[in-house]
Each structure stands twice: as structure tokens, then as C-alpha cells.
């Protein structure tokens, strides 16, 4: 049972506040922000308590989505509700951001009125709610199918081009009474890598987590059939086909997915509802089908002037026609480092010293496959000693690899049955992110 729901910006601004039961005053909003900002570390606890009030929150789109309760309610139920609420707001408003929430506050209040009744959760289904929601969404930016300036995964702005524009997949879903929108379906294969590479260059850990997401803008949705690789196998003993095996260790599916053709033909069948849903999730542990996308060759030494010299060579082992984008290397440096001078191998790179986090951040907007970049960093460290050398590293990389899946999973086909009258555009996109990519020095 939920007492209140409110949404705060990262600065503590009150964006949405809804009190369902009148059990706690509005001062709990400021109390929550004081408690969450007073905690040390980047990840505050999801559940907090003050007297008889329990705060449960998630962080999405740079916002705090908070629910309070005074009853003995399962926190996992409230966490799941908040995650579904963020998905609903994203479906109806187009994106999750402070600006989007401010522009669509009336729509969000109407959603809360339908979703929760006197603290009891009623429904979080987009298909059911579209029959009751009357407020039209206000897009934070105009939608243009021909706008290819920023593209990416459901609105993630990247520098990759020649694919479906991000704004196409971040507009609000079309309600049943609005038939003027384009009939489109977006299927995204998203993978996250967790990699640890030792100081000798040996791969020590490699895990991959992936999911297939579908976002539907079809006014009347028929059955959709998604064909995966014929060689797709689950577990080491279930190898299929004659080509290179595409293997995962574990796999789970959305409850709406029918699997009667999956074992024999590797086809997923479902009738997607309007909005975004995760059709399939999978995991591969302690294995990387291909070489790690990035290798680092560091040289750390002390010059005659007592400065710390860090020479970094970063190599991209992707195919020549591929590229990593938004590559960022975070290099921990000794405590007390005061100034940084740098020599970078190309003008589009940048680097800065962040004293608070004691790290040098090296940013590369675009890194083509089969190439190598280098950087020389010279740091002034007062009281520099041999012990200070031990404070350098390990290096953490963050990046995005468009049009690439680390496991090799591909969509063979995407079919609608029965055939839809009129043009129905179908987009399939692939992207691999770095969840944690650590290179020891």
C-alpha cells in the first residue's frame, strides 16, 4: 500500500507530488532529499526509513522516483511498481528527463490517478490505460523522421549515423483515437559487457548481459515473429547449425512470448502492446566470443623534474568498418595531483584532471576499428614518492559500440502476421555498452 508518490530532480526540485492516503505530510519530500544527499557514495540505499515512514526510490533519467509507505509492504513490490511507472511515463511522454516531466505534468498526474487508487495499485498496462488517458503528450523536441543528427538507442544521443533517428523511438505512443502517427516497430538488441583485463594483458573476467527490446507504435498490433540466429544455443551442450555458434548460458522471456517455434526454428512469437517491453534477456558468463574491443598499453614513470609521466596507447580491435563512440578512459592518479599537461595524438581527443575523484579522464568521441591512439600525461604531484606510483590505476573504460553485439546475436527477420495494410516501418538496431571494463596497470 502506497502513501505518496513524488518525483524530484537531481537538484531536489519538486516536479510531481501525489498524496493518496494523507498519512504523512508534504515535508517528507524535503526530508527524503536531505537523507539521500547526506549519504556518501554514488549509490544510496534504495529503501530508507524515518520514524514510521519508509522511502523507496529508483533513479531513472537523472530523476528521483520515490514512493512512501507506512504499512508493512514488500519493498520489492514498490520497486517493481516504480520501474513500471517510469516505463509508463516514458511510453506516454516519449522520454525520461526533467524537461519532459515538467512539460507533461498534467499527463503524469492523470496516469497516477488511473494507476493507483487510495494507495492500491490498479494497473500498469499501456493497452488498458490508453482507453482512459485523455491528456495529449507534449514532445520535448519536434519529431522528424529525417533528422539524422542524433541517433541511438531509444533516445541515447550518439554520433553514429545512417540508422533510424533517435527521435523516432522517443516520441509518445499513439493512443487508440490518434491514427495519424506512423506505424513503426523498433527492435533493439542491447548488450552490456563486464570485462577485467590483467596487467599482463590476459583476460581475467568476461561476462555479457543482453536483452531484446521492442517498442511498438502500431495502432492495431498483430502477431510479430522475430527470427534469431539458427545457430543460437543455450548452454554448452546445445550447439546447433553449421556456422559459428552463438551461445548464451541463460535465457528468459517475457510472459507474452510464445515459444512453440523457438526450439526448432529459433523464432519468437508475440503480440506486442503499444510502448516498450523487454522480450528476451540472456547472459553469457566467463566467456567472450571475440577479442576484447579495446587494449591498453601503459607506461608509468617519473621524470627528472619529479613529475609523474603516464604514456597511454589505446588500441581498438574492432573490425576496420566499425567504430567505438563516446569512449572515455578514467585513470586514477595519486592523491594531491594539482596540475596536468597533455599531448594527444589527435585534435578531437580531450583530457582533464578531476581532483575530487583523483582521476584523469581521457575522452575520445569516435574510435575507428583497427586504429591506435596515444596520449602523454604529465602530472605535478607534491610529495611524489615511489609509493605514489601504486596509486595509479586501474583504468576504467566506458564506450558504446553501435551495430555490434558481443555474443554475435542477430535478428534474421522481423515479420508481422497477418500482413499490415499501409506502410509499416520496421527498425532493428544493435548496440553494446560497457557495464564495467577494467584494465589493470
Image (tube, rainbow, N blue to C red):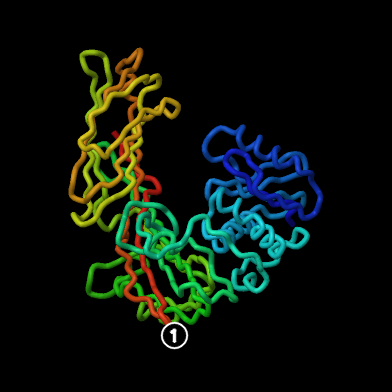
Residue extending furthest toward the right? 22
The local crowd at label 1, few if under 14, some if 14 to 19, many if 20 or more residues have their Cα within 10 Å, is: few
Across and down, in percent, residue 219 comes to: 52, 77
Across and down, in percent, residue 207 comes to: 37, 53
Residue in the foreground of this view, choosing between 231 and 326: 326
Residue in the foreground of this view, choosing between 437 and 144: 144
Q: Quadrant of the N terminus?
A: bottom right
Question: Secondary structure under badge 1?
Answer: loop
Kindly indicate the quadrant of the structure image that contains residue 154: bottom left
In this image, 336 relative to 342: left or right? right
Can residue 406 be seen in this snapshot? no
For the point 53% across and 76% down, which residue is it? 179
Number of numbered markers: 1
In this image, 276 relative to 306: left or right? right
Can residue 277 be seen in this snapshot? yes
Across and down, in percent, residue 163 comes to: 33, 63
For the point 32% across and 15% down, which residue is it? 384
Q: Quadrant of the C terminus?
A: top left
For the point 68% across and 45% down, which residue is it? 55
Q: Is residue 220 above or below residue 379?
A: below
Across and down, in percent, residue 80 comes to: 61, 58
Residue in the foreground of this view, choosing between 205 and 334: 334
Kindly indicate the quadrant of the structure image that contains residue 79: bottom right
Residue extending furthest toward the bottom? 418
In this image, 378 relative to 320: left or right? right
For the point 53% across and 59% down, which residue is it? 139
Kindly indicate the quadrant of the structure image that contains residue 111: bottom right
Label 1 sits on residue: 421
Q: Is residue 313 above or below residue 407?
A: above
Q: Is residue 398 above or below residue 247?
A: above
Amino acid at each position: 500500500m502506497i502513501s505518496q508518490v513524488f518525483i524530484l530532480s537531481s537538484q531536489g526540485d519538486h516536479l510531481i507530488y501525489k498524496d493518496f492516503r494523507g498519512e504523512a505530510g508534504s515535508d517528507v519530500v524535503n526530508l527524503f532529499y536531505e537523507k539521500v544527499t547526506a549519504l556518501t557514495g554514488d549509490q544510496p540505499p534504495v529503501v530508507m526509513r524515518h520514524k514510521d515512514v519508509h522511502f523507496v526510490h529508483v533513479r531513472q533519467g537523472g530523476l528521483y522516483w520515490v514512493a512512501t509507505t507506512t504499512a508493512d509492504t514488500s519493498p520489492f513490490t514498490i520497486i517493481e511498481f516504480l520501474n513500471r511507472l517510469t516505463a509508463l511515463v516514458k511510453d506516454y511522454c516519449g522520454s525520461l528527463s526533467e524537461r519532459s516531466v515538467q512539460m507533461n505534468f498534467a499527463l503524469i498526474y492523470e496516469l497516477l490517478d488511473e494507476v493507483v487508487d487510495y494507495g492500491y495499485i490498479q494497473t500498469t498496462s499501456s493497452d488498458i490505460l490508453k482507453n482512459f488517458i485523455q491528456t495529449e503528450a507534449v514532445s520535448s523536441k519536434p519529431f522528424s523522421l529525417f533528422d539524422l543528427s542524433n541517433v541511438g538507442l531509444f533516445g541515447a544521443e550518439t554520433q553514429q549515423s545512417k540508422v533510424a533517428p533517435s527521435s523516432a523511438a522517443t516520441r509518445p505512443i499513439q493512443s487508440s483515437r490518434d491514427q495519424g502517427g506512423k506505424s513503426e516497430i523498433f527492435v533493439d538488441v542491447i548488450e552490456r559487457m563486464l570485462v577485467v583485463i590483467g596487467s599482463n594483458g590476459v583476460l581475467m573476467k568476461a561476462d555479457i548481459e543482453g536483452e531484446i527490446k521492442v517498442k511498438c507504435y502500431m495502432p492495431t498490433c498483430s502477431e510479430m515473429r522475430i527470427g534469431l540466429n539458427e545457430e543460437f544455443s543455450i548452454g554448452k551442450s546445445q550447439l546447433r547449425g553449421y556456422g559459428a555458434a552463438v551461445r548464451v548460458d541463460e535465457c528468459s522471456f517475457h510472459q507474452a512470448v510464445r515459444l512453440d517455434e523457438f526450439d526448432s526454428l529459433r523464432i519468437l512469437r508475440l503480440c506486442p502492446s503499444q510502448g516498450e517491453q523487454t522480450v528476451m534477456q540472456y547472459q553469457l558468463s566467463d566467456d567472450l566470443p571475440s577479442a576484447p574491443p579495446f587494449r591498453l598499453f601503459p607506461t608509468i614513470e617519473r621524470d627528472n623534474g619529479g613529475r609523474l609521466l603516464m604514456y597511454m596507447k589505446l588500441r581498438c580491435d574492432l573490425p576496420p568498418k566499425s567504430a567505438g563512440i563516446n569512449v572515455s578512459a578514467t585513470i586514477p592518479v595519486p592523491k594531491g595531483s594539482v596540475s596536468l599537461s597533455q599531448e594527444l595524438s589527435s585534435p578531437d581527443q580531450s583530457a582533464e584532471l578531476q581532483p575530487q575523484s583523483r582521476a584523469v579522464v581521457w575522452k575520445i568521441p569516435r574510435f575507428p576499428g583497427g586504429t591506435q591512439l596515444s596520449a602523454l600525461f604529465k602530472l605535478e604531484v607534491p610529495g611524489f614518492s615511489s609509493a605514489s606510483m601504486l596509486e595509479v590505476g586501474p583504468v576504467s573504460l566506458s564506450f558504446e559500440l553501435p551495430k555490434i553485439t558481443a555474443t554475435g546475436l542477430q535478428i534474421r527477420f522481423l515479420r508481422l502476421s497477418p500482413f499490415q495494410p499501409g506502410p509499416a516501418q520496421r527498425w532493428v538496431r544493435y548496440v553494446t555498452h560497457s557495464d564495467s571494463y577494467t584494465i589493470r596497470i
